[in-house]
Amino acid sequence: MTVPRSELPLCSARRLLICAALIVAVMLDRAPVAAQSQSPDARLVTLGTGGGPLLRTERAQSANLLIFPEGLVAVDLGQGAISRLTQAGHRPDDIKAVLLTHHHIDHVADLWSFILHRWASRAEPMTIVGPTGTKDLVEGLLRASRPIVEASEALANGIRPIEASVEVLEMNDRNSRLALPGFPSVMVTAAENSHLAAGQAGLTNSAPVSLGYRIDTPSRSFLFTGDTGPSMELERLGQNVDVVIGEVVDVEAAMRAAEQSLKLPEAARRTLAQRMGTGHMTPAQLGALARVIGANTLVVSHITPSTAPPSDDEDERLTSDIARQFSGRIVVARDLMTF
């Protein structure tokens, strides 16, 4: 369907919009039925896009939601994750599995509340996947839940023990690749990234470890970098992945925010500055990672220090800095975006 040139001068702006709508309608009407009915086998929702530990109202802390045909999976549960999950139209009992990249506050702060809400709603047992130490973390949260459970006699009547509401799987060198329980089409592979210097001895070490996750489905793949600096392990893990969800930090601005908000002794300040500089990604480093692994799309999240509300100017600045290294699609995420 075309509009004759002789008619164009007679169309007002409103008529032009109507013409365009008619053209789109005709095109959709002629599209094959199969193409209209196709839907992706995975969707990504950025629940929380801010780094911590400072709290911000405009950005919840690190949390992502993957929606598969088999159910929902959360990747990290920082402060504000449950509120954002509710805003997205879901509840904690909708989640069948949680992947934790590491155990910093801004990635696990809502985990306890998440476990309690699922227990109270009589949800089916949930799988929690994380690095070494995740079992200790969850066991501690379950022990801390006992007074709450005992005080909830009416609610707890006939409900399974809270200890039976979760199953924990730790990713180490014996099971760094797993078929996610309950998700036959989803394969999860983990690799240690460079965020925690103490974890450089390996995944079997008892020292804290930080992971990146690759998630493969029949039609697409995702790489969640977690918090990390440049990492050859992540480069190997993410080869030819479709979508990278990566962190970015302005170290100088983050240190200024920390000095204003946290009472840090001088030694602690120096250690934090060193860790911020080596254990996180600058925009250029994140762009380089996406380029090296050959990603199609880069979703920028865990934006630190997030001291100001999200703005188009800041998004454009980050995009410009990253685009010097990566020519693919770049999206600076905000809370509750859906991909």
Image (cartoon, rainbow, N blue to C red):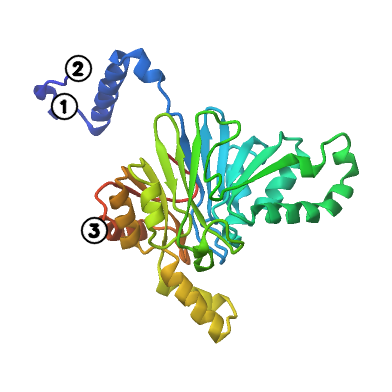
Give x and y (percent) for residue 124: 71, 33
User: What residue lies at 54% left-to-right and 84% top-to-bottom?
Assistant: 267
| Relative side of 18 to 41, left or right | left
Crowdedness near tag 2: few (<14), some (14–19) or many (≥20) residues, C-alpha within 10 Å: few
- Ranked by sequence position, the earlier of labels 2 and 1 is 2
Q: Which of 179 and 26 is in front in this view?
A: 179
> Hey, which quadrant is residue 325 in on the image?
bottom left
- Residue designated by label 1: 10
Q: How far apart are marks 2 and 1 (CA)?
A: 18 Å
Labels 2 and 1 touching (C-beta < 8 A): no
Labels 1 and 3 touching (C-beta < 8 A): no
Dot 3 falls on a residue whose secondary structure is: loop
- Residue designated by label 2: 1
Camera-nearest label, 3 or 2: 3
Dot 1 falls on a residue whose secondary structure is: helix
Give x and y (percent) for residue 321: 28, 61
Query: In the picture shown, does residue 69 fall above or below 308?
Result: above
| Amino acid type of the residue tagged 2 in the rendering | Met
> Hey, which quadrant is residue 13 in on the image?
top left
- Residue designated by label 3: 324
